[in-house]
Image (cartoon, helix red, strand yellow):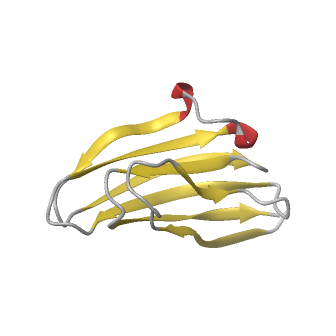
Amino acid sequence: MAETFKITAQFTPSAPNTSENAYTVGAAFSGAVLSTLTICNQTASQMTFRLSVADSGEALATKQYIFYDTPIRANDTLASTIGMTLAVDDVVRFYASTASCSLNIFGTEIV
């Protein structure tokens, strides 16, 4: 079993108030462990975000949320060490009240 430590996703929303796929475990991997995520608010106003994880790419559902309407102050960054374990086709989705923010996910993909 080979492991690749990497930045697994760097994502900026294409529009505010829209849930979008930020990371999917590809078929080339048997799984992934996402260790840390950061969300950077690049505006002069408070923003909120949502982060969800869908098993095998299921449609978005309430049960999937890890963060929901969590606030981040103006020009601030939230960092979370979470240790999320994912299988093939699992999807991390991101929603933000502004498109002027970024999500970075760091982890290990397992072959």
Towards the viewer: 108 or 78: 78
Q: Position of residue 88 (x, y in %)?
A: 79, 50
Q: Give coordinates of residue 63: x percent, y percent.
A: 55, 26
Using the rendered view, name the quadrant where residue 58 is placed.
top right
User: Residue 35 or 97: which is nearer the viewer?
Assistant: 97
Question: Residue at (47%, 64%) from the top-left corner?
Answer: 14
User: In the figure, 91 relative to 42: above or below?
Assistant: above
Q: Is residue 47 shown left or right of residue 28?
A: left
Q: Is residue 109 above or below residue 66?
A: below
How many numbered circles does the render carry? 0
Residue drawn at x 46%, y 45% is 51
Q: Quadrant of the N terminus?
A: bottom right
**x then y, percent, for residue 85:** 64, 46
Q: Is residue 58 left or right of 35 when viewed as pictured?
A: right
Quadrant assignment, res 30: bottom right
Name the outermost residue toward the top. Answer: 63
- Picture residue at 47% right of the left edge, 59% below the top: 36
Is residue 50 rendered to the left or right of residue 59? left
Near-viewer residue (105 or 61): 61
At which x and y percent is residue 111?
Answer: 83, 64
Is 41 placed above or below 47 here?
below
- The answer to which image quadrant residue 108 occupies is bottom right
